[in-house]
């Protein structure tokens, strides 16, 4: 029915979920937060640093499936403060280069480990 995805190069799940799932040609990544997989600690509380760590984690999971950022078709960005929107856009855009997947961005009251950002991804093989 589906296959779970796991890599040591991204943070381990902190609950009853997987880093990602492959169902047919679709890859669904669980929301990634800015945890450094080597230390298992949240990176510094700076929206630019946290956005970059989240994107590194996403890339690591995609690489496990021999995919790249180019396979992303949809993202959802969760921010603890919409005032970070423009800085996140700038950093997120650097990782995507000219790609423009569908996207939603929402402000939430709180995220796991009190991080500033979480991003979930849908990709296609």
Image: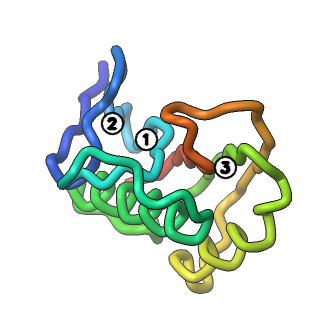
Q: Report the front residue among 125 and 18.
A: 18
- Name the residue carrying label 1: 29
In the image, residue 83 sits, relative to residue 68, either above or below, namely: above
Mark 3 surroundings: few (<14), some (14-19) or many (≥20) residues within 10 A? many
Residue drawn at x 62%, y 64% as measured from the top left: 47
- Residue 77 image label: 3
Residue at 25% over, 30% down: 4
Furthest residue in direction front, as rendered: 44
User: Counting residues from the N terminus, which is met first, the one under dot 2 or under dot 3?
Assistant: 2
**Is residue 105 depicted above or below 66 in this figure?**
above
CA gap between label 2 and label 1 equals 6 Å
Q: Quadrant of residue 80?
A: top right
Q: CA distance from mark 3 to mark 1?
A: 12 Å
Q: How is the image coloured?
A: rainbow
For the C terminus, give its image quadrant. Answer: bottom left
User: Which element is circle 3 on?
Assistant: strand
- Judging depth in this view, the residue of 76 and 107 nearest the camera is 107
From the image, tell me which residue sits under label 2.
19
Residues marked 3 and 1 touching at CB (< 8 Å)? no
Mark 2, other Cα within 10 Å: few <14 / some 14–19 / many ≥20: many
Asked if the residue under mark 1 is in contact with the one under mark 2, i.e. CB atoms within 8 Å, the reply is yes
Residue 98: name its quadrant: bottom right
Q: Which mark is residue 59?
A: none
Q: Nearer the viewer, residue 25 or 110?
A: 110
Q: Residue at x 44, y 52 (%)?
A: 34
What whole-number distance in Å separates the C-alpha atoms at marks 2 and 3? Answer: 16 Å
């Amino acid at each position: 029915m589906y296959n779970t995805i796991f890599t040591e190069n991204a943070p381990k799940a902190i609950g009853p979920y997987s880093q990602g799932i492959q169902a047919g040609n679709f890859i669904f990544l669980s929301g990634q937060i800015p945890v450094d997989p080597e230390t298992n600690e949240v990176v510094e509380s700076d929206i630019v640093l946290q956005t970059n760590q989240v994107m590194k984690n996403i890339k690591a999971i995609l690489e496990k499936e021999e995919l790249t950022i180019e396979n992303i078709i949809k993202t959802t960005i969760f921010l603890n403060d919409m005032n970070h929107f423009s800085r996140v856009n700038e950093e997120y855009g650097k990782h995507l280069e000219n790609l423009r997947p569908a996207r939603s961005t929402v402000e939430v009251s709180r995220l796991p480990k009190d991080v500033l950002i979480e991003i979930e991804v849908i990709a296609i093989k």
